[in-house]
Amino acid sequence: MKAFAARGGVVRFTAGVDAGGTSEQGLRDLIDAVGNGPGIFVYGNGIASTFHPKVYLFRNQDSAHLVVGSGNLTEGGLYTNYEANVLLKLDLSVRADQTLLETVTTSLDAWSTPTEGECFSLDAALLDRLTAAKKVPDEKAARAEEKSAREAAGEEVESIFSRRAVRAAPKVAAVVLPADEEGGSDAENEEEAATLVVPHFDPVAPQGGHNTTFLMTLQRTDVGVGQTTKGTQRRSPEIFIPLIARDTDPDFWGWPNLFVQDPAWTGPIDQHGRGKMDRPNVMVRLGGATFPVTMWYNPDKKDLRLRSEHLRSAGGIGDIFYMQRANGTGGFSYYVEIVPVGTGRYNSLIPHCNMQVRNSQKLFGYL
């Protein structure tokens, strides 16, 4: 899901927290994957009624895959339990498949619409409240309780069923952090590190350019989602770079040498004979995440665009988009920050956004 969101995909996920089966760590992983925004929801009921559906819908404009079954999004549900699921492949050009999809999405929308006392948009603050209220257990504590219960039972409980091996979940890469950096004992750090996945990215070519850093103030077109009416599509996640900014330092963007013509483009051609041009899979580092971004030139709207949900969801109107070219050794071509309005760093950088875009409030500059 994290990689999908980084490519610009839209994720909505609703988890139940009634029966103690959803852990604090699981929800924190969801926030980390999708972002601390309106993509994850928790659904519950104050009486003894459990939110229990397992419905997974994957879709684009033309087709959809619908999985309905018994498996949770857990180690047991995906690997070690006995589960049953049905996969329906829907062709959205077929009316019957459209009708089924509409029926399913109606239920999914009902379970992911914030409703006081019933459905909540999940963020770090709400997760802290759920943890304090003991609605979501800590995985380590839960495992320790299960182990204690088994040890207390000893040989007094009859084992009716034989023990048969099942396929285990794949192991993640373990990285041991020094105790003096993280606190606690070496054993505690090793146990915690075993749950961490540390991705490796191969080096990329150094990013050229006459300047080191690009600065730009973000506007609604950069961070907005467009249509918000229920049932309508969100606008594509794109940061808009004016052509005057691109042409001030073309090498900074790899223009035009690192771009390729889109053979499927049937729209306008510019005065240089160029149609739509793409620079795909440009590796970008933002915070602790490294992910691919697609750069593309739109000869119709006359701008350069950076397509990424990670970039769009990170900023707000007026914030400074800070983009620094890199030498590629870390596996990314650019390092990006979003510098919020009102911070000291913003105040130090805004004087360098000293170039204006015609008919726009957008400002930009280079360092």
Image (cartoon, grey):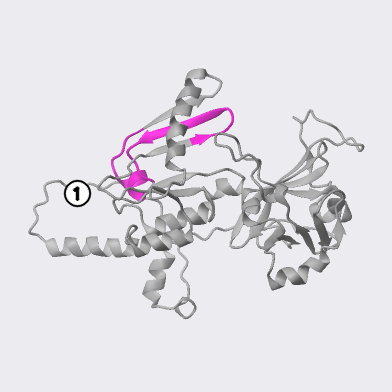
Residue at the image position 83 percent from the left and 61 percent from the top: 365
Residue at the image position 55 percent from the left and 34 percent from the top: 231
Residue 237 in the image, given as x and y percentages of width and height:
66, 45
**Was residue 199 drawn as part of the magenta stretch in this picture?**
no
Q: Which of 313 and 290 lies nearest the eye of the viewer?
A: 313
Residue at the image position 14 percent from the left and 64 percent from the top: 152
Residue 205 in the image, given as x and y percentages of width and height:
74, 56
The residue labelled by disc 1 is 163
**Residue farthest along the right direction in this orientation:** 271
Q: Which residues are magenta?
A: 58-85
| Position of residue 85 in the picture relative to residue 228 (left or right) | left
| Position of residue 362 in the picture relative to residue 69 (left or right) | right
User: Which of the 4 image quarters holds residue 207?
Assistant: bottom right
**Residue farthest along the front direction in this orientation:** 116
Q: How many C-alpha atoms fall within 10 Å of the one at disc 1: few (<14), some, or many (≥20)?
A: few
Q: Which of 66 and 348 lies nearest the eye of the viewer?
A: 348
Q: Which of 119 and 284 lies nearest the eye of the viewer?
A: 119
- Residue 367 visible at all: no
Q: Which of 107 and 98 lies nearest the eye of the viewer?
A: 107
**Was residue 80 drawn as part of the magenta stretch in this picture?**
yes
